Image: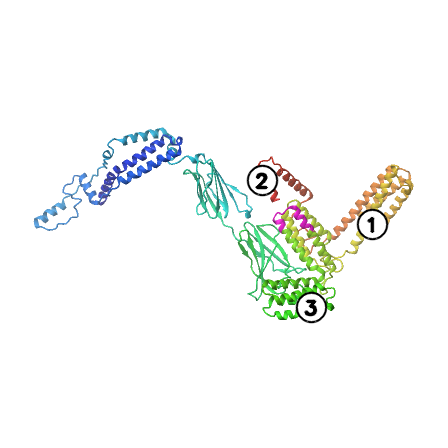
Amino acid sequence: MDRRIAAARGVLAVERILPRLWPACAFAGFYLALALTGIFPFIPWPVQALLLAATITATGLSLAQGFADFRWPRGIDGARRLERDNHLAHRPISERHDRLAGGDAFARQLWALHQARALPAKFRIALPHADIAARDPRGLRWYLLIALTVGLVWARGETGPRLISAFDSGAGAAATLDAWIDPPPYTGLPLQSLRIGDGNTITVPQGSVLNLRVHGAPRRPGLAAGSNHAPRFTGEDGEYSSNVIVSASARVRVQVGGKAIGQWHIQALPDAPPTIALTATPRRTEQLATRFAFKGGDDYGIASLKAVIVPEGKPAAKPLRADLPLAAPNARKVEQEAFIDLTSHPYAGMMVQAHLEARDAIGQTGTSGTVRFRLPARVFTDPLARALIEQRQVLATAQKGRENIMTALEALSIEPERFYEGQHDIYLAIRTAFYGVRDARTEADIERVQRILWDTALKLERGGLLSAAEELRKLQAMLTAAMASGAPQEVIEELLKRYDQAMQRYLQAMAANPPPPGQEPLSPDAKTLGMNDIQTLMQMIQKLTEAGEREQAARLLAMLQSMLENLRLTQGGGAGGMGQQSPQDKRRNEQIQKFGGLMNKQRDLMDRTFRQGQGQGSPQDGGPQGLARQQGELQRELGEAMKGMDPKAQQKMREAGQAMGQAQGALGQNDLPNAGNAQNQALEAMRQGAEALARQGQQGQQQGREDPLGRGPSPFGNSGVKIPGPTDLARAREILQELRRRAAEMGRPQAERDYLDRLLKAF
């Protein structure tokens, strides 16, 4: 019964609601019928907007007025509607829960008979009867029905678009959109164009810039980008633009006049922090630099790397943060070694704890594990230099005791006319340090005194070798940084020239300083590193930079610096450094020089023979007969020089001697043309013999030899650096020249010129 009453209440609700909806439905229906005719795309948007606003206003007012006195049907209303539809008298449904208030026995029997009266097995609920005619006395509803029918027939397959046009200005149909994403510059990724209607998720680095350009829009577009800050479009005359920084994943939507002209789901990929790890415990080199071997990586490249060093047992000490050079700019994976000289720091010689700290372009850091080692320190042999370094160490580590340092410095500077004759600069430096300690007020003042003491000790020790090594490391770091930052080629060449000069000074200073007395002798099978190897490496670095292979050039430069750091001066031949020549090599070089002199004499004799044939010979030559005697003497000198030669080179020299004999015979017969040909053959044979002799010497030096780092016979053979050949280098230069030529042509399209500029910046 409750369900039947609820159904009856629903019928009553329909009867009450429909008449109240009629005026609002009339306004909305006639507006939609007008839209079905397809007229809105042909009328100005302000007129359509006015019609739409009027329709919405009239509809809203009609609904407000019609439902002002609306009440939902109650349960008693549903019960009586059910009784009325089923012709039930005496209200058996609506009064079924009533109770008799009182009365005699007859009344109670009568009430029981009334309740026992059976209800029908089936109930009938009449359909809703909405009295719309009372609300529409003029019959406008029939005109609305006709208008909608005609509109539907007229629209046919365009019903949906025409109905949408009733609420759309149509501006989005004419507007076009260009969209692309610029990743952050530090990622090195190219820009990414977005296709309209791309339903796939687009993954971009966090911090990328979404560039939006709308063309042909009659009004300002709208933009939604989730939680990202979406600035309003700016522009005029149909051209609008906006740039969104993608900091979080979002669904981006661009719309014009209520119509979406572009939407994408963009996922922002956060930048992971870099990773770094030490592959070996830091150790000292032969030149007392600290070697750090490490490997690491980052999704977009490591920007900088530092070694953080803290003295052991001194938690309050200020950490030493030393920059480590990277072989490649913003490398995503690094596995290399770096050398830094920390002997100038007050912590030198102390047990320290160190770890590496890698930083990417946005400042995120990654750290390695902590290792414990002793920081290398220079051993000063000069007594005065040792004393200055000792006072410097005390000044850096002691909290108190400056009076003792002042007393020591004053004692070291007594009687300058006796102890500092010819070294007035040393005396003045010590006195400056004394007054610096006395007047120090800040930490910077103490550091200034420490530098004075260190520089003075360096000047006293080993004739400038330490300063030359430090200058070489600084230039290597400058070169690496210049290659990483894309510096112009002329800057790279100037730095390479300065590096080569500093290397020569370093080698000269090393040669001028004998090995320390307590140096451990090398094994007899230790190998040498010759100047030819070093110069070959410098030439290859120069060629790699000219070919645009700067990353490989930086790696090769790091390898050369590693060799120089491990270079060890020895006495005698066969050493792990710049050793002397062996007797065999010395004899071979003397032979090559002797053959060079013979070749010069043969070339001079051939020139005089040619002038004699032209009638311009000198009387001092004695004519063809005199030239024949000189040719015979030269042949005898060649025979003397051939003694003890290698058989392969000796064969070419025999051919040269035979050609000299033929030339002598032709000169004796005044046959100058044939004599000149024979002399030319002799000269060519001697040249080939000298080359064979030189190749034999190079093979003898390289056989079984390794560089100080154990990399094999070639200083760059097993370095992991791919060395391009002459053909590759020439081809690379041709490509660079062609790129520069095309970039200079102003008649080319701007897009092509921009592309060429990007290529030139990259290479």
For label 2, count other residues whose C-alpha is less than 10 Å away and answer few (under 14), some (14-19) or many (20+). Answer: few
From the image, which quarter does the N terminus lie in? Answer: top left
| Tag 3–tag 1 contact (CB < 8 Å) | no
Q: Say which quarter of the image contains residue 135.
A: top left
187 left or right of 62? right
From the image, which quarter does the C terminus lie in? Answer: top right
- Indicate which disc residue 755 carries: 2
Whole-percent x, y for residue 2 in the image: 22, 45
The numbered mark, 2 or 3, whose residue comes first in the sequence reads 3
Q: Which residue is mark 3?
A: 413
Q: Which residue is mark 1?
A: 594
CA distance for labels 3 and 1: 58 Å
Depth check, front residue: 30 or 6: 30
92 left or right of 248? left
Q: Is residue 373 visible?
A: no
Element at badge 2? helix
Camera-near label (3 vs 1) is: 3
| Tag 2–tag 3 contact (CB < 8 Å) | no
Residue segment shown in magenta = 481-497
For label 1, count other residues whose C-alpha is less than 10 Å away and answer few (under 14), some (14-19) or many (20+). Answer: some
CA distance for labels 2 and 3: 67 Å
Camera-near label (2 vs 1) is: 2
Give, as a three-letter code, the residue at label 2: Tyr
CA distance for labels 2 and 1: 58 Å
Element at badge 1? helix
